Amino acid sequence: MVVDDDESVRESLPDLLKEFGFTVLAFSSADEFLASDSVDQATCLVLDIVMPGMSGLDLQKELKNRGHKIPIIFITAQKDEAIRKRVLDQGAVDILLKPFSDTALREALSKAVGEI
C-alpha cells in the first residue's frame, strides 16, 4: 500500500512497485487508508511522513494501537535525524529520503517482506 498526499508519487510509485511484482493500492491520506478495507490486507506500507491531517507518524501510532503489525517504509522530503531515529525506534523498516533510488526502495522492500 502507498499512502502519500502527492499525486505524482501516487501515480509513479505504484507503477514501480508493480514492476517489482507487487499488487499495489494507493491512498491520498492516512484517513482514506484507515477507512478502506485494505488495512487488514496490507503486507507492507510505503508511507509519507508529512501529510495534511493525520501524518505518517500518527498513522504508524494508530496502526500500532489497533494491533496491526504492517511493515512500514517511510518516505520523506525532509532530512531530520530525530524523526528518522523515532520512526525506526517505533518499528519502521526504513526511511527513504525523496528522491530515492529504485535500488534503495527494493532493498527496503526486501527487509520488509523478504526477497523480491
Image (cartoon, rainbow, N blue to C red):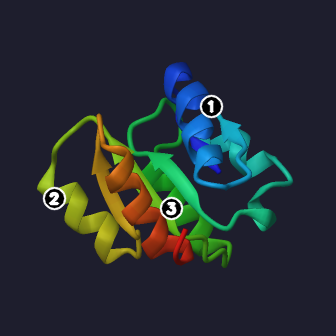
Amino acid found under the numbered disc labelled 2: Ala
Q: Residue at x 53, y 78 (%)?
A: 114
Q: Residue at x 65, y 45 (%)?
A: 18
On residue 60, which mark appears? 3
SS of the residue under disc 3: helix
Q: Nearer the viewer, mark 2 or mark 1?
A: 1
- Which residue is under mark 2? 82
In 3D space, how far apart are the residues under numbered discs 3 and 2 (Cα atoms)? 16 Å
Position in image of residue 35 (x %, y %): 79, 47
- Which residue is under mark 1? 28
Position in image of residue 91 (x %, y %): 41, 76
On residue 87, which mark appears? none
Q: Residue at x 43, y 58 (%)?
A: 106
Would you say 97 lies left or right of 3 here? left
Toward the top, the furthest residue is 8
Q: Quadrant of the C terminus?
A: bottom right
Amino acid found under the numbered disc labelled 3: Gln
In 3D space, how far apart are the residues under numbered discs 2 and 1 (Cα atoms)? 25 Å
CB-based contact (under 8 Å), mark 2 and mark 1: no
Would you say 59 lies left or right of 23 here? left
Amino acid found under the numbered disc labelled 1: Ser
Would you say 109 lies left or right of 32 here? left
Q: Residue 73 sits in which quadrant?
A: bottom left
